[in-house]
Amino acid sequence: MKVAVIYNKQQDVEGVINVFGMQNQETYNPKTVERVASALEKGGHNVRIVDGNIKVIEQLESFMPRVVHGEQPGMVFNMAYGIQGVSRYTHIPSLLEMVGIPYVGSSPAGHGVALDKVTTKVMVHAAGLPTAPYWVFYTPDQIPDDLPYPVITKPKMEAVSLGIEVVHNKKDLQETISRLVEEFRQPVLVEKFIPGREFAVGLLGNQDPEILPVVEIDLEGDPNAIQTLDDKLRTPREKICPARIDDRLKEELSRLTRETFRSLGIYDFCRVDFRMDDQGNLYILELNSMASLGLTGSYVLAAKTAGYSYESLINRMLDVAVERYFGKQQLEALGEQESLVPSLIKKTTTPLHTRLRSYLRGNLSTMEASLQTMVETNSYVRNIDGINALGQWIGNLLSRMGFHKDVITRAEFGNMLYFTNHNSDTNDILVIGQLDNPSHFQDFVPYAVDRGKIYGTGVSYGKGGLAILLAALQGLRYTRSLKKVKCGILLVSDESAGGRSSKSLVADYSSKSKAVVGLQGAGLSGELIVSTSGQIKFNIEINRMTRKGQADFKDKYDLVSFISQKIISLRKLNDEVENQSVTITSINTHGVGDQPPDHASLVLHIRYRKPDQKDALEARVFKLFEIPATSPLKIHITRGASRKPLMETPVNIQFMEKIGGLAKMLEVRVQKSHTEMPSILTSISPEIPHVEGLGPVTGGNGTKSEYVVRDSLIDRSLLLAYLISQAPKNFSV
């Protein structure tokens, strides 16, 4: 199951449009968030950590399954306390309900009630449950003379012991009320202080919730002691679990916890705090609808006492939410799938894909750093030094993983590289990528991350795929799976030039492989490419040769008019035959002073789907630019880089279906696709299974705004890694 862990960073002012109201003082330590995510991954889930700020919906949209399209639902494990304002706990749940994403924990209504200490008191009292007498004050002038002291103060909408203080007389209470109202901008709850013992009782579940062992806060024999915020942050009091109490008191605490949970409308889990006076009377202090999951917290301590490991507790919390939303049958159905909701208690080994995902997510920053290094290396197709430098850098990384390198020297384009991790004559799988890109340094776009997208020259056109490859191999090496596969890697240096020099290499090395995959970027829906258009490039140069006495030709043979007419004729090709298109990529004219131009150039690309279209299209272009021998125009046409189409074949469809089955198990979104962009795989025999598009999810291809979807780096690396690991037994079609 896809699970997004949402939390808030401390004082995340960049995540809001405007700053107002009380800023949240509650945040999880990032290490705790990571610990929760890791626990879910060990449970076999596909996990993302998401910052609960203004960009949260955009991040969830790119990660969560499309249930309306028939995909299995995902979940949010909500650890977000909110950023600012009142009822902060309700903000993320409200957004999730709006967009239809189920989540662990209480509804906005439940959180709103629990965070509001006054409303909690009203509802607990109305349910006939014991709670201390209380008052609510907005100003010091409201305090009556007959108030029974001592009392304890609590801001109405705060948590974690913010503003709590025991007060023994009216004068001190007036000062405390003034200070708290000014500081927190909200009314203050005042309760009769109950000297005695303090307990915390955790609950897990819904219809028949499990009551966790009772925790007693060690007040060191002082009935007047309390837990202040300073105690919790600096010198937390010891916790005794299970509490040293008799069965009667244990049963009563369990009953009151269950009744409080139900009366406030809470879901999935909570913690209820109590005080007990010297007569044995219990008083409900509050319910925490977001009980802390920190290792030192009373909720986690109670769960461990009950026999849970941290991992099994976190996954059990997810389980009870899944059951609440979808029923026990759905929970059992999910549990049948190893990748979804396994039992951590019964499980003895962790599946490979779970270990891979955990490694890849933990090393996302390394993956991004590798991609940044590659973007900052100028590997323009004509920059041989840059291409060789990039190849050397990648080669060093691969050599550390046990790969051997063969260098195929190409003076015109730079070195092409072939790597293997074995000594056999054949590969279980061959991965093909490119070192070059078509963007000259003058068009360079630096590496940048913005709103979940990674920008930079080459990120979608080769370098993103290389980052995926390196991460996948590192993950396989970490899980000790790489040596079990005979893997080949071919990195070419002339893809941007149509692969003129690499075609024979691709054909040769692929013939020695059971299956081949390419590292082009996928589209925004995770497309895997089983067919591509063919492409022909034409460079057309036109000169107007004016001789003495032929000045009138200037008007009759105007180059701008001539080119305009030809462009109109070229565009008609788009409509004549289905699945063919003409794109004009460059038009230039040159003249002297204010005279009409006497030179023009035109670059065009023609794309087509069927191999038998090529000769006819070439003939049409040459026919279109035919001119009489007497014309002063001289036209020179040269064919540039060309690629034949990658055809959809039964072998490739079968290969795609196998990859799709793996992707479904891994919860990585893929779909079969055709693309207009030519592929390096077109030189491969149709008898060998091959699929393009195993790179990251990309957008803006062919522009300066090309980007990689950051979250896709993990999913696509996982898919490629698992695909490679399965190659020996699954991909000989």
Image: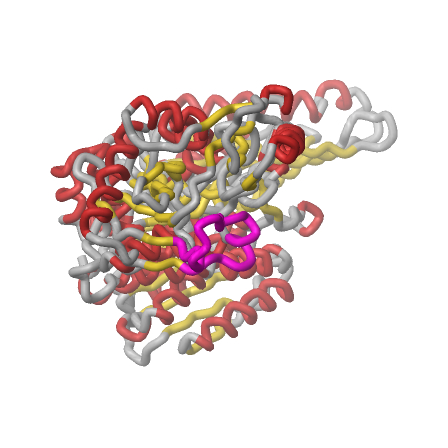
User: Is 631 within the magenta?
Assistant: no
- Confirm whether residue 706 shows in the render: no
Image location (x, y in percent) of residue 92: 44, 32
From the image, which quarter does the N terminus lie in? top left
Q: How are the colours assigned in the image?
A: secondary structure
Residues rendered magenta in the picture = 217-238
In the figure, is residue 139 to the left or right of 726?
A: right
Q: Considering depth in this image, is 48 or 688 the residue closer to the camera?
A: 48
Horizontal relation, residue 703 to residue 433: left or right: right
> Measuring 46% from the left and 61% from the top, which residue is drawn there?
363
x 31%, y 75%: residue: 483
Quadrant into which the C terminus falls: bottom left
Label the magenta part by its dominant secondary structure. loop
User: Is 27 placed left or right of 253 in the picture?
Assistant: right
- Residue 87 image offset from top left, x and y in percent: 48, 28
Q: Quadrant of residue 260?
A: top left
Residue 708, x across and y down, in percent: 50, 45
